Amino acid sequence: MTSFAPEVYQGMGLRTSEYQLICELLGRSPTYSELGMFAVMWSEHCGYKYSRKVLTAFKKYKEASEGDGLENAGIVPIGGGLGVTFKIESHNHPSAVEPYQGAATGVGGILRDIFTMGARPIASLNSLRFGPISGSTTPEPIKARNRYLLEHVVAGIAGYGNCVGVPTVGGEVSFHPSYSGNPLVNAMSVGLVKISEVTTAAATGPGNPVIYLGSATGLDGIHGATFASVDLDEESESKRPNVQIGDPFAEKSLIEATLEALKTGAIVAIQDMGAAGITCSTVEMAAKGKVGMKVNLDLVPMREPDMEAHELLLSESQERMLCVAKLGREDEVLDVCKKWGISAAVVGYVTEEPRLVISRKGVVEVDLDPALLADMCPFYETVTAESAEVGEARSWNGGLDHVDCHKLLIQLLGSAELGSRKWVYRQFDSQVQTQTLLGPGAGDAAVLMPRGISSGVAVAVDGNGRQVWLDPFTGGVNTVAEAARNVACTGAKPVACTDGLNFGNPENPHVYHQFKEAVEGIAFACERLNTPVVSGNVSFYNRSDFGEIIPTPIIGMVGVLEDGTAALPSSPKKPDGLKLGCIQVPLETDLSWLGGSFAVSFELGQELGTPIRADLNGEARLHGLLNQLALEKRILSAHDLSEGGMATACAEIAIKANCGLHLSVSSEFWKAKSEAEALFGELPGVVFVSYEASQVDDIKRLCDDQGLPFQEWGSFFGTELVIDWNKNTWRWDISRLSQTFDSCLDFDQMLS
């Protein structure tokens, strides 16, 4: 066979050393189709060649990689023989060049990872990051592009999610200059399944038919995995063909057809054709089952009849699955697909010899051991080194003594970073399936109560790139703690999580340092909170002509509430006369509470200081306490302190309650060193709870039992937010705060 010139394999993303290794493993030069398959399977997106060694810090990942391998999504039991399966995936690069379809197909892809497990998707969430959309320091053309990306990403999520019939119940949106040109679009899906009916992706049974089902294969998305494994640049716009096109109505039919076909018992194994399409599904299913496959591409449903073998193998057309059926029962699968209007065809069969043989028009285009593609990807490590810029920024331990605290709260609430997300979530259907107890904006996490069970399932996604940039380990710890705390604020017990790890180029020492330290921080926190990482995704090369993104790991946390009806909102529904108290995980620190805070970033224009690390033992006690308080109906709402500090959190409570809130805060309890620190410092482990006055003694007793300080701060009444602290009094009109809070994403106002 003819050897390929460097520009051919390098154009596919392969290094010369990797091409030489491929030739060595095969004992010959690859065919063009085989070369393309190696390129996508050995890309960072599929092969995890820079991340796999670091990810062994996660206990479950290490067990899976050393055992039977990873399935499409993680799963945790919730009682009654049921399990919740969930995963988060990124679609960053596609969304940068084609935001609507990039976001839409991100939703579709993660849904397929869920129902491939035999689970019915019951919820979607998203974590979104964009460059600035307002303000005076960013040029208008850049802001305009960021607004365009925001509008069309949200529209893509809504357009796909609403049509496919899965509620979008929660998420987050954040803004930072580093995301200009490289937005982050992370989609999470949650499903419900009988644990006894969980399906696998491991192909077995020589002679068993291999069935293609779903939409026809087209030319969209070819080399999409490779596209996701390189930096974005000025030529990225030309890579629109690497972005897939989604069809949510086809996905809805595919969900029903797949779940019904699985019920027949005729399917042995099944996998989504995600990144790398037919290549990924045939390779991974065969390698996982230690078998081979013989596939005839002529039998694949295709949109253009003249498609070449490599195009069919690498296309990432959406809404497609590959399954292995029991020999003689393939018609049962085909009949179900016909009923739902889904294309389906037997395209090959399983072979005992672990060899993947793929032909097109009578010519064998691929003939190799699938393990070469699945397991022989070379792994790399980069020498780690923290940048001097970060070390200097972290050494700041100052304050904001010059600021007008009254004015600053109004500015923070009106900022795109901290303002209301109504403009976003009102575009999503959060109530379809009618199982949503707490939807977007109602609680610190969303809560679902699936029909047929009394338990509630709480889900949240969280990330804080500012803190991770300043201190990757602490940032990783605090991201897990924040996600778990948000779930706990609904009364649920956090049980497991999924991660979306978004970083720059891992070949740069400072980026690899950020990645390694953040992963170790996440693993450390998950181990101590008993919330294992059961699934996840790594997205590297998040860099554009504007520079690289700040490191942004996202945590999707799942919790279980024994009595779903006890779920707590973030603000009381009938607030008049209720009390508000503060529960605090005690922390001894000399660090400024403003380190790594949004207030400092907003006021000084840069990330400064050392974030305060969460006390994980105290956080675990806090989770148990909130669960008990919710189940015993002793509190009526719970909201944690996070970005924007105490004043922002209390303002959010008052705005959502549409009621005044008068607080008198003891400086002996709230030991801040300055006014700005007291109001805007971001101290972990703090939760504000509302309750009836008659409950205060029992709340104090239960807090004392857990070693968690509690203090009653005030009451709901009137029309103002009033905060007294250390002989200082601040007053804000609730109606003005509400108007400012709700108008932060008013595009017409931004352009005026």
Image (cartoon, helix red, strand yellow):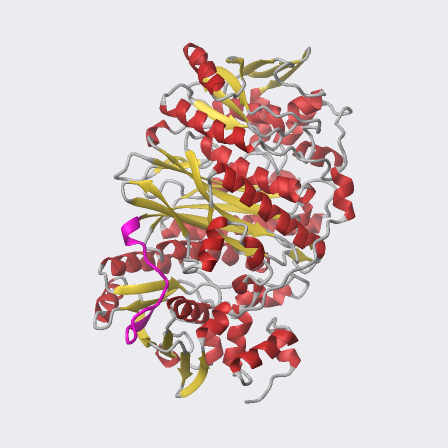
Q: Residue at 30% across / 49% down in the picture?
A: 195
Residue 37, position as x, y percentages in the image: 51, 74
In the figure, 322 relative to 706: above or below? below
Residue 109, position as x, y percentages in the image: 44, 57
Does the rendering let one see residue 465?
A: no
Q: Is residue 92 magenta?
A: no
Number of labels in the image equals: 0
* Screen quadrant of the N terminus: bottom right
Q: Residue at 66% across / 27% down in the picture?
A: 681
Q: Where is residue 261, by image quadrant?
A: bottom left
In the figure, 426 relative to 214: above or below? above
Q: Residue at 63% across / 39% down in the picture?
A: 474
Q: Nearer the viewer, residue 22 or 67?
A: 67
Q: Is residue 207 magenta?
A: yes
Q: Where is residue 8, by image quadrant?
A: bottom right
Horizontally, is 197 left or right of 403 in the view? Answer: left
The magenta span reads: 194-212
* Screen quadrant of the C terminus: top right
Residue 32, position as x, y percentages in the image: 53, 82
Q: Nearer the viewer, residue 740 or 489?
A: 489
Horizontally, is 582 left or right of 142 in the view? Answer: left
Residue 661, position as x, y percentages in the image: 54, 16
Q: Where is residue 283, by image quadrant?
A: bottom left
Does the rendering let one see residue 111?
A: yes
Q: Nearer the viewer, residue 383 or 193?
A: 383
